[in-house]
Every structure is written in C-alpha cells, then in structure tokens.
Amino acid sequence: MMTNINELPIPVLIKLFGFVNKINSSSYWFVNYTLVCKLWTTQILPTAWNEMTIATSQPAEPLIEYSEDGILSQFPSTTSEPYKFNKLVMRVGKVSEYIDKIKSLTTIDLRNNSSTNYVIDRLAEALKSNKTLTYLNLYNNRLMQKGGTSIANAMKKNQSITHLDLGLNLLGANGGNAIADALKVNNTLVHLDLSSNQLGLRGAGPVVEALKINKSIKYLILNSNQLRDECSLPLADILRSNIGFIELALNDNEIGSKGGIALAKMLKSSKVLTKLEFGKNELGDDGGLAMADVLKNNKNIKVVRLNWNKLGVKAIKALSESFKTNSTIIQLDLSFNNFGDEGLVCLSESFKQNKSILSLDLSRVASGLVGHKALADSLRVNNTIQTLDLTNCKITNEGGVELAKSLVDNKSISTLILNNNTFSKDTVSELAKTLESNSTITSLSLVHNQLTIDGVEDLFKSLSTSTNKSLQTLDLTNNLLGSDGGNIIAQHLTKSNLSELILTNNQLSSQGASSILNVLPQSNLQTLDISNNSIEPDVATSLCSAISNSQILKLNISTNKLDDTVIPPLIQAIQTNQSLISIQISANQFSKESNNKLLYSIQQNKSIYYYDLVEEI
C-alpha cells in the first residue's frame, strides 16, 4: 500500500496529470521537494495548467483550496475520479529552462528567491517571445541594476505581461532609468510595483517622465524610494494629463506638505482613484488639510493611509469633517499620529455619523482618558467598524474598562486589537463580562500587556461558562501567564469554542504546556502556538499524545528546549496523524541527524503542507 505520491511510477503520474484540466471540486497543495523534482521533467509537459505559482520557499498559507483527504484517497479508482486542482505551487528554481515548454503558463511568482538573479538573463530572454504570461512577481530577489535592466529590456518586446512586481530589488537610479525607457515603448503593463528600490529623484524622475507617454499604467507602486518633494511635484504635474491611476502608492517617501498639497490638488478630481496611499511621509497639518479636501471631493476612494504623517489637531479636525459625509472609505489608517485627546474626540464624533469605514487603525495614537472615553462613546453608536486596532495607545485600566463596556452595545466589531497597552486585570475582567453578551467579536488580541493569569482567568471562565460562543481567536503573546496560567487555561479550554490560541512567550514551561496539550483532544482548537516557552523534553508524552489523538490543524512548538529524546515518539505520532497541515518545530535542540529524521517523517505525512524544518547538510 502506497503512503506517498512519490512512490507512483512516472507513467501513472503522467496519467494523473491528465485530469488536471477538468472541473476542480478540490485542490491539492504540493510542496514535497522530491515530488517536484520527480514530476518536473521534460517527460511531463503540463499543457493543461492555466496558472502556476513557482517559488523556492513555502508560503505561510496555501494559495489554493486545501483538501484534507489528499489526492490519493480516490486514486487510482475505476469508479470515481481523483481530486482536481487548478493551481500548483512548487518549490523549484531555474524556471527559465521550462517557460518555453509550458505554453499555457500565465503566472510566475518568484518572490523572495535568492537564486533568481542567477538565471535572470535567461528568464528575461524567454520573456521577450513569451505570449501567455500575464503576471510576473520578482519581489525581493536582489536583482540590482543589472537584473532590473535585463527585465526592462524584455518588457520592451513583451506584449502580454500586465502585472510586474520588482519591489525590493535594489535597482537604484540606473535601474529606474532602464524601466523608464521600457515604459516609453511598452503599452501592456497595467500594474507596476517599484517599491523599496532606492530610486531617488534620479531613478524615479525618468519613470515619472515616461508616464507622459505611457497611458496603460493604472496601478503604480513607488513606496519607500526617497522621492521627497523634488519628485512628487513633477508627478503632480503628470497627473494633470494622466489621471487614470486606480492606485498610486507613495508611502514612506519623505514627502512634505509642499509635495502633498500639489498631489492632493490633482487627485481630488480623479474619477477612478480608489486608494490614497500616503503613509509614513511628512505631510504635517497643511498636507493633512489638503488630503481632507481630496476626501471631501473624491467619492471613489476606498482605502486611506495617512499614518505616520505628523498630523496634528488641525488636520484631524478637517479629516473628521470629511468622514462625516464620506460614504465610500472602508479602510482608514491614521496610526502613528500624535493628535492627542482633542483630535481623538473630533475623530470619534465623526464615527457616530460615518457608515462606511469597516477597518480602523489608530495604533500608536497617544491619547488620554478623555480621548478613550470619547472613542468608547462613539463605539456605542457606530455599528459599521469591524476591525479596530488600538495597539500601543497608552490605554489605562480606566480607559480600557470604558472601551470594554462600550462593546456591550456595539454589534459590528469582530476583530479587536489591544496590544501593548498599560491596562491590566480590570480591563480584561470587563472584557470577560462583555463577551457574555457580545456575539460579534471573533478575534481578540492582547499581546504584550504584562498580563498574569490573575486577570486572564476571568476571560477563560467567561469563554467556558457563558452562552457566548463567538470568540474564535485569542492571542496572548508576550505576557506573564507562567505554568500556573497554562494549568488554569487547560481547566477551561475544553468548554470554550476557541479554534485558535496563541500563547507565544508566556513562560509556560513544560508543566503549563503539558496541561494544555493533555486536553487538546477534547478541545475545539485547530491552531495552537506555544512557541518560545522554555518547554523541555519531559513534554514528549503530552505532545505526542496530542498529535496522535487530536484533530489539530496547525501546531507551533518552535524555539523551545526539545532535544533528540523526543524524536522517536514524535516521528511515530506524526506517522499516525492525518489532520495536521502545518507544524513549526524549528529552533529546538535537535542534532543534525535527528533533525533530518524528523524532516523526513514530516515530508512523508500526506496532510502536512507547511513546516519550518530545513535539511541540515
């Protein structure tokens, strides 16, 4: 009986791939390197593939639907067909050697691939004649000027690619010039990302000038390129004649009030712009006033990022007035702006009237009790905001209690982030009471609040005894729960409806972790993170039993003190487990031999698609 698809002979694998073009009821995630090497040969030309992502490392989450049953459960069979898939995600280099053989390929994703630079000239040459590729992602490949120039030259001839991501590649000014030359000729590109490339005025200036000729670019991402006012002013001038940008991203460019005012003047008349991306600049109050004017006049913008812009009370008052009448903004980021109590009071009043904002980020907005009470009052009235981030807002217990009480009446917030504040037991206890009647909060984050189990115990009691079953995700990373905390959490865990619990860096030790692992099979948890908790090898029995007997999907036990003694029982547990799809267990104290044995067992498991161990050579 075969337990791994790699055991199938090549002819059978070829036949299997013959099913790939049929209706996909389920998809399967291939990450096994052996499988990729075996399948990725000139014998198998997957002409049925219409989209494929190619990368050298495993993404954190699957890009396709995942089938727990696996592709082998119905194959081979004479009565039923195997599961289908419409995307394959592979870990393979030297994609240029195969581009010409895959005539249906539309997508190549090589982000974060340090080996891409080695084959960039061959890849660029293939792109010149390729007519099917529409999406090319080369983010973070250290292409430098040479690689960027090669891609730019290819784009002069390529007439199919519409989406090109060259972010974080150190292209420099000369690379920017090469891209500018390509834009003067290319009329196919719609989406161009040049973020984090150290372009400066000498590199970005020519790109901006090229837009006088190029009319196809609708999404231009120029984040983190030191553009300053010197480049934003000519860009504003370009917008007079080219106002077709759906997205113009200029975050982190040291743009001051002068450049911001000039750009705002042009953008407020745009009929298609949907994102106002000006985070981490230096707009100040004058620039903020100009952006408020944009939002009063432009009714198409859905996303507004004005974080980290030195916005004061004057700018926030103007922006608040625009939010009262604006009905299109769904995402608002005003984090890292110190407008204090007065500004937060004005902003809070606008939320009583605004009916469109779904996501609100006010993290690192320093305010006092007056501002936090005003925000709490607005939340009693507002029933639109779904995600609220109040990280590092210096919320004290008194302010935290007010916010918690306001959520009894609020019926919209589903994700609440209260990380890194100064409240303690009183706020958490009030949140526990709130959850007894609130049925909309599904995710609560209390990271780095110096909380002990003394306050958090009330929260877990509420989750296990109240009628409220809405909270699914609880993040308590970087607190002080200790081993006693782990024991108390375990007492209430089986009666809660939590599906995801994150307890990273809480000094659980083996005792606290074992208590939680022992009740895991009786809980509803699908994701458990107990990384960085000084967990020692004596947790082995609890850990292996949990893996063997629970239905956990994702487990993170990395950065602990596990050693070689846990490897044999752990391997046996992984061999029997059929539910895990992700396991993180790196940064423990395994020898090279044990690491590789564990890695091999994980690779043989049919359900696990993500793991963080790498082979030690």
Image (cartoon, rainbow, N blue to C red):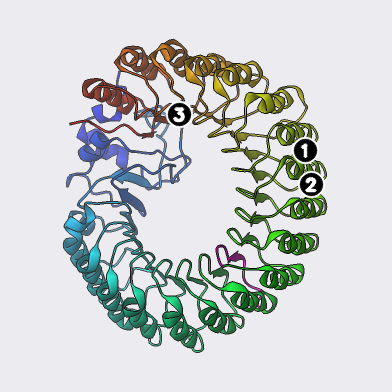
Looking at the picture, which amino acid does disc 3 mark? Ser
Residue 353, given in percent of the width and then of the height, sits at: 80, 63
Residue 256, given in percent of the width and then of the height, sits at: 51, 76
Question: Which residue is located at x 46 percent, y 66 percent?
Answer: 252
Judge from the rendering whether residue 342 lies leftward or rightward of residue 137; answer left or right.
right
- Nearer the viewer's eye, disc 3 or disc 2? 3
Among the 4 quarters of the image, the one containing residue 524? top right
400 lies above or below 523: below
Query: How far separated are the C-alphas under marks 1 and 3?
Result: 30 Å
The residue to which callout 3 is attached is 531
The residue to which callout 1 is attached is 438
Residue 49, given in percent of the width and then of the height, sits at: 33, 51
Residue 473, given in percent of the width and then of the height, sits at: 61, 35
Helix, strand or loop at mark 2: loop
Task: Check disc 3: other Cα within 10 Å, few if <14, some if 14-19, many if 20+.
Answer: many
* Visible residue check, residue 482: yes
Contact, mark 1 vs mark 2 (Cβ under 8 Å): yes
Which comes sooner in the sequence, label 1 or label 2? 2
Which comes sooner in the sequence, label 1 or label 3? 1
Judge from the rendering whether residue 216 lies leftward or rightward of residue 43; answer left or right.
right
Task: Check disc 2: other Cα within 10 Å, few if <14, some if 14-19, many if 20+.
Answer: many
Task: Check disc 1: other Cα within 10 Å, few if <14, some if 14-19, many if 20+.
Answer: many
Query: How far separated are the C-alphas under marks 1 and 2?
Result: 8 Å
The residue to which callout 2 is attached is 410
Helix, strand or loop at mark 1: loop
Does the stretch in magenta take in 264? no
Judge from the rendering whether residue 229 lies leftward or rightward of residue 142; answer left or right.
right
Query: How far separated are the C-alphas under marks 3 and 2?
Result: 34 Å
58 lies above or below 346: above
Q: Residue 566: which disc?
A: none
Question: Which residue is located at x 22 percent, y 45 percent?
Answer: 44
